[in-house]
Every structure is written in structure tokens, then in C-alpha cells.
Amino acid sequence: MKKSTAILLFLVASFFFPVTNGFTQENQGKDSVKITAVVTNEPVIKKERKNTISFNVTNPSLISSRFMTVGFERVLTPNQTFSVQAGSFSVPKFGGSLADSLGLDTDYKDKGFHFSADYRFYLKKENKYGAPRGVYIGPYYAYNYLNRENVWNLDGQTFNGEVNTNIKLGIHSLGVELGYQFVLWDRMSIDLILAGPGLGFYSLKTDLKTTLTPDQESEFFEKLNDYLEQNLPGYDFVIEPGEFKRTGDFNTVDIAYRYSIRIGYRF
């Protein structure tokens, strides 16, 4: 009886425990695969956008509607970028108060362009995210060139005649900029260059021809100098008061400054 009971218990144990243990291991193996599949399933990776195209809204708003530039910024490392900007450079049409005081009508031709580049370091300690988000600092270079030809037809009480002017202005600028760039909805950006002090290398070439009398010329150029000082960027850095009278080349080095607001699209 005892022997039969022992054999029965052995058979029951042999039948249940291996199968049960194997079933458990098999199920554990399946569960493990399932869990691993869930854990190691490739996450949805947000596409990295390293390029930004932007438009400078400051120049046409504050200087001239014909001063328009487009920029491109490229992320090189997690915290560094390089950007370039290019476009047309212009200043407002000569006229306004000058036209009223001289009784003139002007016809002009404009040729100008802008080019600039900067290398940006986005500050790790100050920014939660990498480039191109947050605070940045870096060196910049900019060049503006303008060739303005004017025909001044004078028909007033003081002046009566014609003045032809050709003004060529070139400005090289080197400096350091500080800015902040916002990224909105992953695609849009607002880039603020808050401060950009530097050195400006100014050159001006002038060529003027008139049919005025000497006395009229003297008064005309006095008024023209005052007007250009107020309306031509960098003019007062290049020309000493009263120097601009007829034809010549003028060169000087003085302070330069850079600031802008750019609206961009990332891709």
C-alpha cells in the first residue's frame, strides 16, 4: 500500500511539476519578449531641424523699404551655428525738407547690396535647449555698399540750375553680437540681435557737377551736407562738417553697431 502510494505520488509529481515549470518558463519567455518589445520599441524621434531661413523686418521698417535681406542659419554642433545674410541695400530718396528748401525735383538711380555673416555660440549654462534656441554670442562681419546717382533740377527763388551727383558709400563692419532666438511650434523662429558693437571702416566717393554760380553752389552744398548727415547712414562718420563740396574720396574708421529682428522658418 505504501509502495503504491509512493509510486502514485511520484507519477503525479513527474506529470505536473515539469509541465507546470516548463509552462511557466515558456510563458515567462513569451512575457519577456512582449515586455522587451514594449520597452525596446523604437520611440518616435522628432526630426532635427538644422536649417533656418529668415527675413530681416528691421531694415525695411526703420531705414528703407528697399533695404531687404534674407538670411540662412545652419546648426554645426549642438551649441554652435553659422549664418549668412544677403540682399539689397538702400536709403530713402533724397527730398523732403531738402526739396522744400531748394525748390528741387530729383531723379535718381540706386544700386546697393548687403552681405553679412556671423558665428554663434549658444550658451549651454543659460539655455535649456541646444542651438538655435536661446541666448547666443559671437563675432560678425557686415558690408554695405550704395551707389546713388541723382539729378537735381533746381527751380526756386534762390537756386536755378541743375546739379548731378554720384555718391558711392561702402561700410565694412567687424564686431561682437549678443542675441536671443525663440523657436515657436518647432517650425517658426524669432531672432533678436540685441547688441552688436564694433568697428566700422567707412569710405565715400563723390562726383558732382553743377550749373550754379559759386555763391549758389556754396549755399546748395551747405544744405545738402545737413540733409545727408540726417539721412545717409555713416555719412557723419566719413565727412567732416563742410568738407563735402564737390569731388573726392573720404575714408575713416569709427564705431559701428548691429541690431535686427528676424522672422524665420526652420527645416
Image (spheres, rainbow, N blue to C red):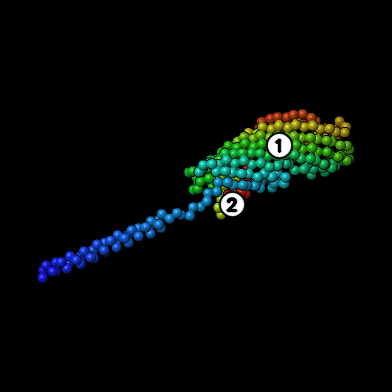
User: Which residue does the image show at 66% across and 41% down from the upper left?
Assistant: 86
Labelled disc at residue 188: 2
In the image, farthest residue toward the bottom: 1
25 or 93: nearer the eye?
A: 25
Q: Residues within 10 Å of mark 2 (few under 14, many from 20)?
A: some
Mark 2: secondary structure: strand
Residue 227: quadrant of the picture: top right
Q: Mark 2 belongs to which amino acid?
A: Met
Quadrant of the image for the N terminus?
bottom left
User: Which residue does the image show at 73% across and 37% down from the upper left?
Assistant: 146
Labelled disc at residue 85: none
123 or 54: nearer the eye?
A: 54
- Vertical arrangement, residue 210 with respect to residue 127, above or below: above
In the image, 178: left or right of 215?
left
Q: Mark 1 belongs to which amino acid?
A: Tyr
Residue indicated by mark 1 = 145
User: Which residue does the image show at 24% across and 62% down from the upper left?
Assistant: 18
| Percent position of residue 66, x then y | 72, 45
Q: Is residue 171 visible?
A: yes
In the image, 78: left or right of 61?
left
33 or 11: nearer the eye?
A: 11
| Percent position of residue 213, x then y | 88, 32
Q: Give the spatial CA distance, label 2 vs label 1.
A: 31 Å
